[in-house]
Every structure is written in C-alpha cells, then in structure tokens.
Amino acid sequence: MLRQDWVERIHTRLLVRYGTAWIRMWEGIDPEAVKADWAEQLRGLTAHSIAHALGHLPPDPPPTVAPVKAPA
C-alpha cells in the first residue's frame, strides 16, 4: 500500500485544485475508506510518478483512482 502521508498529500492537493467538485465525488462515503482505496490502487508508484501525475492534472473533472482497462 502507498504510504498514508503520501495519500494525505495527494488528497489535499486534489481538494485544493478541484474544491467542491472533489468533495461531491465522495459525498456519503467514509473519507478514510476512500483514502484506503487510493493507497491500495496506487501501491508501487514512485514519488516521481506521483509528482508527475499531480503536475499534469486535467482541468476537469477531478480524477479517480479507478483502474484503467486496456482497450480490447
């Protein structure tokens, strides 16, 4: 799993970038459950990879951590 402090920093960055759109995505879901899912899905990524992704965020909509399926 990804380090908890990294997950916290990622979520803080996304909250600052996307504001209420970010909050609405997870409305009604335990924030700790959301962060635990991100930690699991992002396991194995390097600090460099995470920094690159955070430096290239889309303007809209906020990203999710859902695994991307390869095209068939």
Image (cartoon, grey):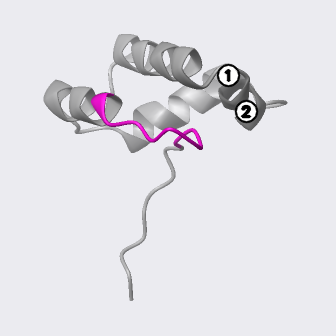
Query: How many numbered marks are there?
Result: 2
Task: Determine the residue positioned at 46% across, 17% down.
Answer: 13
> Percent position (x, y) of residue 5?
38, 10
Task: Determine the residue positioned at 33% across, 19% down.
Answer: 3
- Rendered position, 8 above or below 71: above
Q: Residues within 10 Å of mark 2 (few under 14, many from 20)?
A: few
> Percent position (x, y) of residue 37?
53, 37
Q: Please indicate, yes or no, whether residue 1 appears anywhere in the rendered image.
A: no
Residue 38 located left or right of residue 53: right
Residue 57 located left or right of residue 14: left
Indicate the amino acid at tag 1: Pro
Q: Is residue 61 magenta?
A: yes
Contact (CB < 8 A) between labels 2 and 1?
yes
Q: Who is closer to the viewer here, 12 or 37?
A: 12
Q: Main secondary structure of the magenta part?
A: loop
- Rendered position, 12 above or below 47: above
The residue under label 1 is: 31
> Percent position (x, y) of residue 50?
27, 31
**In the picture, residue 47 is in which quadrant?**
top left
- Rendered position, 26 above or below 14: below
Q: Who is closer to the viewer here, 18 or 35?
A: 18
The residue under label 2 is: 26
Residue 61 located left or right of residue 38: right
> Percent position (x, y) of residue 70?
36, 75
Q: Quadrant of the C terminus?
A: bottom left
Which mark is in front, 2 or 1?
A: 2
Mark 1: which secondary structure? helix
Q: Which residues are magenta?
A: 55-63
- Rendered position, 40 above or below 3: below
Who comes first in sequence, dot 2 or dot 1?
Answer: 2
Q: Quadrant of the N terminus?
A: top left
